[in-house]
Amino acid sequence: MKSRILTIIFLVLPLFAYLQVNVDAQEIIAKINKGEDIFYQNATIIGDLDFRSINVVEKDSEWEFFGNDNTTYKYSVHSSLKFVQCEFKGNVIGYWNDDYKDELHIVHFYENVHFEECVFKDDFLVKYSEFNEKAAFPGNTFEEDALFKYSEFHSAVDFSNSVFLEEANFKYAKFPEYAFFQHSVFNDLANFKYTKFKGEVNFKHCDFEELAYFKYTELSDFIDFSNARFMSEAIFKYIEFSHGVNFENAVFENFADFKYAKFFDPIELNNVAFNGSTSFKYAHVEGKEFITYLLESK
């Protein structure tokens, strides 16, 4: 009998590891304020994870120097954050612009940040945030806005296998090393206008269901769009592929705008399909007009 009970216990115990537990978001903030590192797996986070409740906060005079009229508060998170297969039933707030009080709130993360295979039911807001250590966001589903505008990373970043159901805003964001977005789905605007990529960028097998906006994107290394699908407009106007690009097997179903774009070797265009209208006006490859390059490449 005793051995049977022990057998049942050993069979049941692994199941508890996968049970979804509810965690109040304020409990997480309280742990951060105590200096504890954060790790949750298979948890449901209830309420807004609002980093404006962090104790380490200072008035940031630099923002006033640049002509910002708002009073700016910068919050510093010195705990590592790791969430695996969690569901967030509230906003993740690392940025807030309070128009009534003329206050701007931004959050900087000084330790590792890792969200993996999580579901965010509301907005994920980290505009102006800095990630000073490793940052990883693989396999997540963002059901509302993912606001990474002006965010600055300090190491390689992984957004692979993610789903963005609403706008994915990476405008002006800075990526100093590798940036991985392969096998991700962008159901709404994918905004990478003025984004700065210093390392290699991977958009292989990505689906862009709405506007893919890469106007003025700055590239300092190779970028890969092989097997990507652009279902709506794809804007690459003024972009400079300074260290090469791969569009092998990519499909453009709508208008593809490469006006004023500059291409440099290596360039891979095998089996690329332009099923909508295109514009390569004033586009150049190694100093040659794009059409001339295509004719000479045949």
Image (cartoon, helix red, strand yellow):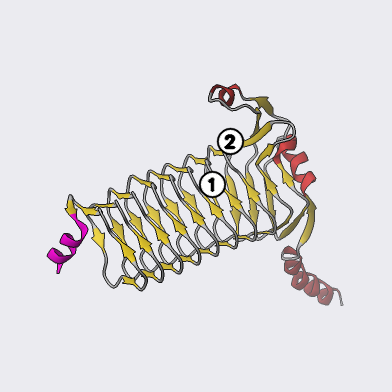
User: Magenta part of the protein: which range?
Assistant: 289-298
Q: Which residue is mark 2?
A: 110
Q: Earlier in the sequence, mark 1 or mark 2?
A: 2
Left or right relative to 84: residue 169: left
How dense is the environment of label 2, judged by Cα within 10 Å: few (below 14), some, or many (20 and up)?
some
Q: Between marks 1 and 2, how big is the CA–CA gap? A: 10 Å
Identify residue type, mark 2: Tyr
How dense is the environment of label 1, judged by Cα within 10 Å: few (below 14), some, or many (20 and up)?
many
Residue 166 percent coordinates (x, y): 60, 59
- The front one of 87 and 79 is 87
Residue 91, visible in the rendered structure: yes
- The residue depicted at 43 percent of the width and 63 percent of the height is 233
Left or right relative to 28: residue 153: left
Helix, strand or loop: magenta stretch:
helix
The quarter holding residue 149 reads top right
What kind of element bears circle 2? loop
Residue 281 percent coordinates (x, y): 27, 56
Q: Is residue 66 above or below residue 162?
A: above
**Residue furthest left in the image:** 296
Q: Which residue is mark 1?
A: 135
- Which of the image's four quarters has the N terminus? bottom right
Residue 290 percent coordinates (x, y): 21, 58
Residue 202 percent coordinates (x, y): 40, 57
What kind of element bears circle 1? strand
Left or right relative to 192: residue 4: right
Residue 77, visible in the rendered structure: no
Q: Could you tell me if the residues under marks 1 and 2 are in contact, i.e. CB atoms within 8 Å?
A: no
> Is residue 290 shown in magenta?
yes
- The front one of 203 and 6 is 203
